[in-house]
Image: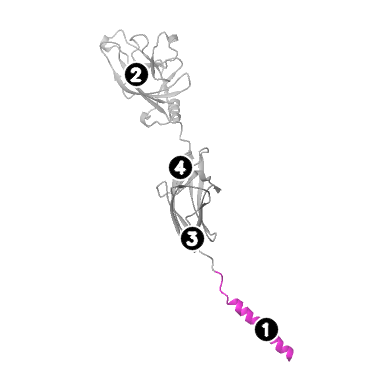
Amino acid sequence: MKQVTQLLTALTIIVGMMLTIGCEPDPVEPIGPSIDLISLNGADITADTVDLGASFVVNISSLQGDVPLSTIEVRENNVAVDPSRIVFDGFAAQSNPNPAVSGAANLSWDIEITADSVTEGTSTYTIIVVDENAKTASASFDITTVDPGTPVTERTMILLLNSSGPVGQGGLDLETGNQTGTTPAANWPDTDLKDMGIDLNLPAAQNWLQQIGAMNSTVLKTPAAGVVYDDVATVEEIIQIFEAGMTVVDQTEAVAEGDVFVAQTKEGNYYLINTTKITVVETDNSDSYQFSVKGL
């Protein structure tokens, strides 16, 4: 009987312990932070295209969960971005991850990031916030980097005079924009374009041909239809225009204001030429073309 009593007592203790354990509340998982991508470069988008090495701005909003935010990090293709490429809400990053504002319950930040300056292509950027419980939240977007090309230099008011005037005029050095001569050709190795002079069979007031040609291995072309001089911003575009153009054989038709030409000089440089003014002088051979020239 004593053994039965002891057994019942032991069972009662075990059942009581099980009931006690079963009644303990389940642990509550802490609530972590949240983050939203508000805008990218001022637009409601999650992908954009920028030049190599250019900066872009992402605006994020982050709210804490149960505890304040601790750090914020920027990753590119899951690799931490060098802090020198990041500006957090107007302040240059000191580290990455970077501390959030001490005790911050929320962040509404503009984050300026400098894109890759070497490799063209698409990268995924991720903004990660971490709270004091090590809970995280993240938002991602894509940036495609492209080579912007070589910017052109433009020279304006470049003159080419009637070649039937005094010796030393009638030619143009596209490399410098200087006026040169045309005859004899051996004396003018830097001349790239030449005026074609006059037609002696016509009256003096009408005899300027108003045509141009190339010299010294320069190749002169007329662009394909649709080329707009003002829209061309890079040397690479000029090369493409040259490659698609039609070669001028001997000389052009009569040149008019607004006519555009493209040339490759013997030095291998490319130039886009816009005819901005034609001046006809009926009393002598000081007729002239005025050009704007884009190139290196």
User: Tags 1 and 3 in contact by the CB under 8 Å rule?
Assistant: no
Q: How many marks?
A: 4
Q: Measure how far apart labels 2 and 3 are at the Cα level.
A: 70 Å
**Number of the front mark, 4 or 1:** 4
Q: Measure how far apart labels 2 and 1 are at the Cα level.
A: 113 Å
Q: Measure how far apart labels 3 and 4 are at the Cα level.
A: 30 Å
Task: Name the residue nearer the viewer: 31 or 234.
Answer: 31
Q: Secondary structure at mark 1?
A: helix
User: Could you tell which of marks 2 and 4 lies nearer the N-terminus?
Assistant: 4
| 175 with respect to 17 (left or right) | left
Q: Position of residue 87 (x, y in %)?
A: 46, 46
Q: Secondary structure at mark 4?
A: strand
**Number of the front mark, 2 or 4:** 4
User: Could you tell which of marks 2 and 1 lies nearer the N-terminus?
Assistant: 1
Q: Which residue is mark 1?
A: 11
Classify mark 4: residues with Cα within 10 Å, few (<14), some (14-19) or many (20+): some
Q: Secondary structure at mark 2?
A: strand
Q: Is residue 127 visible?
A: yes
Q: Which residue is mark 3?
A: 68
Q: Is residue 2 magenta?
A: yes
Q: Which residues are magenta?
A: 1-27
Q: Which residue is mark 4?
A: 55
The three-letter amino acid code for the residue at tag 3 is Pro
**Vertical order, 51 against 290 (above or below):** below
Q: Quadrant of the N terminus?
A: bottom right
Q: Which residue is mark 2?
A: 159
Q: Residue at (52%, 46%) from the top-left corner?
A: 83
